[in-house]
Image: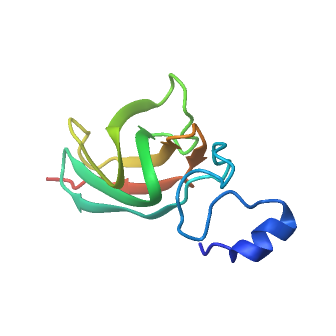
Amino acid sequence: CRRLPPGIERKLGNATTTPDDDDDNDDGTASTSLPIISDLRVREVESESAKISFVTNELTTSVLWYATEEAVVTASSSIMVSVSASSTKNHSITLEDLTKDTKYYYRAVVTDVDGNNATSSTKSFTTDEE
């Protein structure tokens, strides 16, 4: 995803960051722009584990939700794994104790310092048989 130029954001009423891309508006109020999640992918898959990573355009905390059902929801029917309690732009988590030869679905939810949340699309991977 690409950001709109600041002038267009202002015209649309979406201006939330200064050209230097800080997290506050010029008047000191909190940003209302949503964080952007990119490069969400599985880096390594084994029979009982998988390493998932992604990048955000600003410092965020993050949570990864996963399930064996396609409808991954941020609720008790899915499993939540905290990825980072401290703010970062580069996120990585290893899921462990997975079932062999099973398809898993996952999505990331991130929160920036101003409390703006963003949720990724749902992606999937299948663990190895052995």
Q: x and y percent of residue 67 in the render?
A: 44, 38
Q: Residue furthest left?
A: 130
Residue 67 shows in this picture: no
For residue 55, side relative to residue 123 (left or right): left
Relative vertical location of residue 103 with respect to residue 67 in this rendering, above or below:
below
Residue 64 shows in this picture: yes
x 76%, y 68%: residue: 9
Relative vertical location of residue 87 with respect to residue 97 in this rendering, above or below:
below
x 37%, y 62%: residue: 41
Q: Which quarter of the picture shows residue 10?
A: bottom right
Q: x and y percent of residue 76 in the render?
A: 50, 22
Q: Residue furthest front?
A: 27
Q: x and y percent of residue 3 in the render?
A: 63, 72
Instruction: Give the number of callouts.
Output: 0
As rendered, which of 45 and 62 lies closer to the eye? 62
Q: x and y percent of residue 68 in the render?
A: 43, 40
As rendered, which of 20 and 55 lies closer to the eye? 20
Q: Residue furthest top?
A: 76
Q: Which quarter of the picture shows residue 65?
A: top left
For residue 3, side relative to residue 70 (left or right): right
x 25%, y 53%: residue: 51
x 79%, y 75%: residue: 8
